[in-house]
Image (spheres, grey):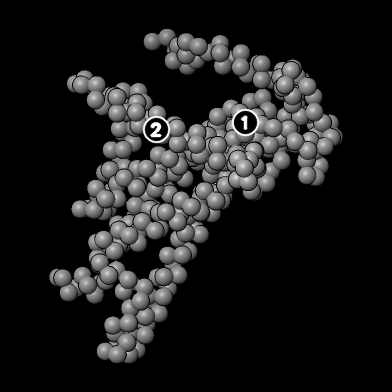
Amino acid sequence: MDISKWRWGKNRWIVIAAAVIGFFVARIYPPVLPHIQLPAEVVNHVGSFAITNTMYAMLIADVIVIVIALIVRRGMSSGKLMPPGGLSGAIEALMEVIHNLTESTAGKWTKTIFPFFATITLFVLIVNWMELIPGVDSIGIIEHAAHEGHAVQQLTGGIATIIKDPGEYALVPFVRVLSTDLNFTLALALVSMTMVQVIGVRSLGLKYFTKFFNVSGIFKRPIFGVIDFAVGLLELISEFSKIISFSFRLFGNIFAGSVLLFVIGTLVPAFAQSLFLLLEFFVGIIQAVVFGMLTMVFMAQATQGHAEHAEEEH
């Protein structure tokens, strides 16, 4: 085997040329640290409705999910005896892993819980990986800065860039990573926890709510009944705390990763950022799987009866 082939690949010159071009471009136009803020920036308006750059990111992610679904459907229905390869094979492998995890945890409720686990994992994964796409957070509209800004240099007709010289302008990107918007992570957490309660009611009926309001033992066993009632209230508080935990875990990790890429790209723009892009690649996978898996585990727990009910059934 020729070692040089598998080490560099057939198109290694593209990587070398991109690195050299990136080095000289960074010397001519030194990167500027973007304006970092928590709320999503407003790009334009439709009437009185403000459209933010994270909304555009959500639309792009939706289109990507639909395209992936169509590609996988085409690969599955092609009629070939060979297992699907490429993107279809990768998605099939991911879905098989998710299905096996759900089946080992949820049992007979796998068919109900698996679609939520798979959809959340795939969508959050695509959303997180959007920060790796060139142009995200870096191409947009140059506007007057609210505080300190930068100067503007015209590149060609209708295209300009901001430079490090002091000025009064800042960049508002067209697309910003959706996971860096707390509105998205909070909405996704609310959907997840709401469906946890729905599945709990479907599996246990109204008895599911005795997990939170257990008053059956107050008169039979006054002391232990009060303890059971207090534990139920703690369970209710924990359900709300899960929403907060879901929201800030995903938001905090991806937002911190975006800031890290901004800072490293500003300090060492030519080569070092590639290592941190690889780090964010794995962070995106981990956060997507964690969010989906926790949702699946909470749903599986909601389908199980309480200890008292389990003893009665036994």
Q: Classify mark 2: helix, strand or loop.
A: helix
Query: What residue do we see at 78% from left, 22% from top?
Result: 154
Tag 1: amino acid: Gln
Query: What residue do we see at 73% from left, 32% from top?
Result: 142
Q: Is 38 placed left or right of 197 in the picture?
A: right
Image height check: is 207 above or below 97?
Answer: below
Number of residues whose C-alpha sits closer than 10 Å to that of mark 2, classed few (under 14), some (14–19) or many (20 or more):
few
Read off the residue under disc 1.
Answer: 273
Q: Quadrant of the N terminus?
A: top left
Asked if residue 282 can be seen in this view, the reply is no
Image height check: is 273 above or below 230?
Answer: above
Tag 2: amino acid: Ile
Read off the residue under disc 2.
Answer: 66
Image height check: is 220 above or below 176?
Answer: below
Asked if residue 125 can be seen in this view, the reply is yes
Q: Classify mark 1: helix, strand or loop.
A: helix
